[in-house]
Image (cartoon, rainbow, N blue to C red):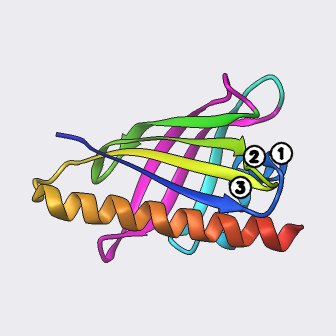
Amino acid sequence: MAEQATEHTTVSAPPERCYAVVTDIERYPEWAADIKQVEVKGRDGEGRPTECTFRAAAFGRSTSYTLHYDYADAPHALSWRLTEGDITTKLDGRYVFDPAVGGGTDVTYHLEVELRVPIPGFIKMRAASRIMSTALRELKARVEAAG
């Protein structure tokens, strides 16, 4: 069964800048510590990555997976779903960017994870929480440094 989690952070930058950073998928290895390599395998008519294969550090080993990106709610949100994974059967998520009261952006990160190997739910939840908190912390640092 898939584990679902949601986390939030506030970034001191406008939503457009947050969106620009998360849609510059080829540059993830520059700021997302667990992402070791990204290969863009497909683009839409606007040149945005739609199919990307990642090599990442996870659970003390290297993992690879391919995500399909959905820009239907751009630039308010970016969604993705797993199309192929070696240790995951689901790695679907969504970033949502809302203007924060007083300036900046409230970023919400939704993630749904299911692994091929049976692992107790509390360990999966801890892993999902770690993925999300790390991603949000690194995104915040990248966006704010770019400003």
Question: In which quadrant of the rendered image does the N terminus lie?
Answer: top left
State the image quarter where residue 36 is shown: bottom right
> In 3D space, how far apart are the residues under numbered discs 2 and 3 (Cα atoms)?
14 Å
Residue at point 30% right, 48% down? Answer: 88
Q: Which residue is mark 3?
A: 26
Q: Which residue is mark 1?
A: 16
Lateral position of residue 112 relative to residue 70, left or right: left
Name, please, the residue furthest toward the right: 147
Q: Which residue is mark 2?
A: 19
Question: Is residue 64 on the magenta stretch?
Answer: yes
What secondary structure do most residues of the magenta stretch adopt?
strand
Q: Which residues are magenta?
A: 47-74
Residue at point 68% right, 28% down? Answer: 71
Residue at point 54% right, 63% down? Answer: 135
Q: Is residue 139 above or below residue 2?
A: below
* Residue 120 rendering spot, x and y as whole percentages: 10, 59
Q: Which residue type carries mark 3?
A: Glu
Q: Give the camera-side residue of 69 and 16.
A: 16
